Amino acid sequence: MKRIISSIAIGALALVGGAAIGGTPASAATPSTLVLSGGSAVFGLDPVAIVGTANNAGVVKFSAVGVVIKGCEAVATTTVTPFVAKCTWLPAASGPTALTASFTPTDAVAFTPVDAAPFTAKVGVPVQGVVSPIHMYVDQVLASGTSGALAPRFGISCAVTSEFIVGQTIVWRVYANNEQLGGAVMDSSNTAKAYIEVAGVKDPIPMTYGNHSGVAFWTGVLKTGAAPLYNTLGLINFKVTMIAKDVSTMMVPATKLVAQRDAAGARVRDASGQQIYNRVAYFKSVSVNPALKGATATWASNFTATSQLTLYAVPVAK
């Protein structure tokens, strides 16, 4: 009986001892973290610097729009805190771009892998949606004659602004030059059509070319107010379009030799008595057959929301 009891006691001790002798039970791995930052640049001018910051050492794989960025397939972090990995990315297009990254820890027992939350890189986009060869400049001014609650919030009438109150009249001013015509001003003689499309307005707003206090440019008008006038508060989304007339002649760049002259107008000669000439650039008119199709250009603002054309309600006195 003593032998049997002893055997049971020894077995129980061995079982308990096994748990103790085997060491501390394995604890769960610590969750890794990875945070993306950076990602601002001007398209076509400089690359985007993307930074991934983790809570332990490891390797980061960077991706843009779901595609792994070449050269950033496995970027090692620094070995001390902050554990940082950097990727240099050359965007293929401008505008907001979704960036992601995945992290693999060096110590796979102590830490878990993790994917970073998506990060939007703001790749600089040209503010003016210019389609070559026509270059446009666009702004808005408040029509004159407003007073009272509708008086200008800033400056005076005809001042450039992007903020308007329901009841005011918005005037677009547009200036354009056509490269195909040697940089000539786009006016009523060489422009087939010019108009503004406003979201929520059924018909395009035609633009007219004319003299305004001694200077000439294109204008388009949008009256705001009670229906049926435009009265949607908030951002006013619009696009300006200009279409040049077809032309049978066009200006092309060329060069020519011009005799160099001194301040008195006399020809300048070299040591051997030979006339000195300089080559200069100019535009010359050439015939085009068949006629050159008139170019089309559009302009749409890409400013941030706080800078874009906005319509507000009439202020209420407090």
Image: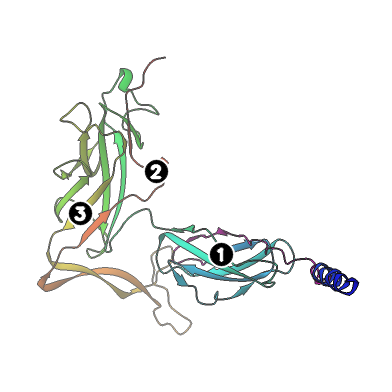
Q: Which residue is mark 3?
A: 242
The secondary element bearing badge 3 is classed as: strand
Q: Position of residue 197 (x, y in %)?
A: 20, 47
Q: Residue at x 44, y 58 (%)?
A: 124
Say what amino acid the circle numbered 3 marks: Met
For residue 123, above or below residue 217: below
Q: Position of residue 231 (x, y in %)?
A: 24, 31
Q: Position of residue 61 (x, y in %)?
A: 55, 71
Say what amino acid the circle numbered 1 marks: Ala
Q: Which residue is mark 1?
A: 49
Name the N-terminal-most of marks 2 and 3.
3
Query: CA–CA distance between discs 1 and 2?
Result: 25 Å
Which mark is on residue 305? 2
Q: Which residues are magenta?
A: 18-47
Drawn side of residue 250 relative to residue 64, left or right? left
Q: Residues within 10 Å of mark 1 (few under 14, many from 20)?
A: some
Q: Are marks 3 and 1 in contact (CB under 8 Å)?
A: no
Q: Please name whichever residue, 225 or 77, is drawn nearer the observer in this view of the structure.
A: 77
Q: Disc 3 vs disc 1: which is toward the camera?
A: 1
Q: Position of residue 27 (x, y in %)?
A: 71, 63
Q: Residue at x 24, y 50 (%)?
A: 240
Quadrant location of residue 115?
A: bottom right
